[in-house]
Image: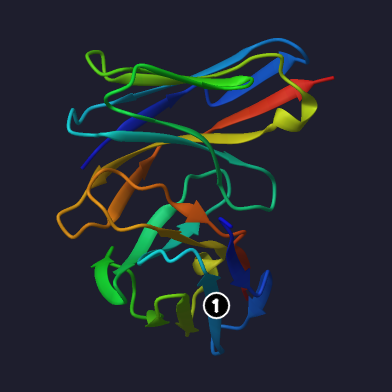
Amino acid sequence: DTEVTQTPKHLVMGMTNKKSLKCEQHMGHRAMYWYKQKAKKPPELMFVYSYEKLSINESVPSRFSPECPNSSLLNLHLHALQPEDSALYLCASSQVGLAGETQYFGPGTRLLVL
Amino acid sequence: GENVEQHPSTLSVQEGDSAVIKCTYSDSASNYFPWYKQELGKGPQLIIDIRSNVGEKKDQRIAVTLNKTAKHFSLHITETQPEDSAVYFCALLLGDSGGYQKVTFGTGTKLQVIP
């Protein structure tokens, strides 16, 4: 099973709303990632969790708040977003290693900020 | 940081023809080179990968070649079918000191297979 699941599939929110994106994997992977993807562009890394600890924050604004409650779950809490934050948000997971480990992506949450 | 150039940005081929997408990179320490296919409305899916100790890898109609000296790697799709139509991203990974992977993606190639 190489499946990463994400909910919801679509999300529309106002600039004053608070919402959360969820990601789950049961492959035993101990690295999990959030990416943002704008139309016709490659995914851009936002956060990396390794062994449930935040390892990389790619200078993401504080209105995005990640959380890794356990080794299978990854959340992204959203608050006071801007219209330019509208994008496809992708979660990925991988083994932890030094030899180059494959990242498996979920289907993404398509977010529209009004 | 690592830079990956991907060409072409768009590619149209007739069904049954071959398609080739090429990526060049700058950091010789890169050691793992996956290719992802992203269909409309979906997340990227790994289709093939190659490691730096291998020059070529094939999986049915898909093959990847790696030239570490010239720092480029290519995706080859033979006997293309309409369902091959998608955006393809090359990528490379460096193992980080923390054991997690920082991926650099190419800019993407939109492949259209014309029936």
B34 displayed left or right of B52? right
User: Which quadrant would the N terminus of chain B be assigned to in this image?
Assistant: top left
B65 displayed left or right of A16? left
Looking at the image, which is closer to me, A97 or A55?
A: A97
Q: Residues within 10 Å of mark 1 (few under 14, many from 20)?
A: many
State which chain disc 1 sits on: A
Q: Position of residue B83 (x, y in %)?
A: 76, 32
Q: Tell me which corner region of the image, top left, top right, bottom left or bottom right, holds residue A69.
A: bottom left
* Residue with the mark numbered 1: A21
Q: Residue at x 37, y 28 (%)?
A: B5
B60 is higher (above) or lower (below) than A17: above
Q: Tell me which corner region of the image, top left, top right, bottom left or bottom right, holds residue B3.
A: top left
Looking at the image, which is closer to me, B57 or A107?
A: B57
Residue at the left extreme, as displayed: B97
A109 displayed left or right of B1? right
Looking at the image, which is closer to me, A15 or B114?
A: B114
Q: Position of residue B71 (x, y in %)?
A: 27, 20
Q: Residue at x 47, y 77 (%)?
A: A73
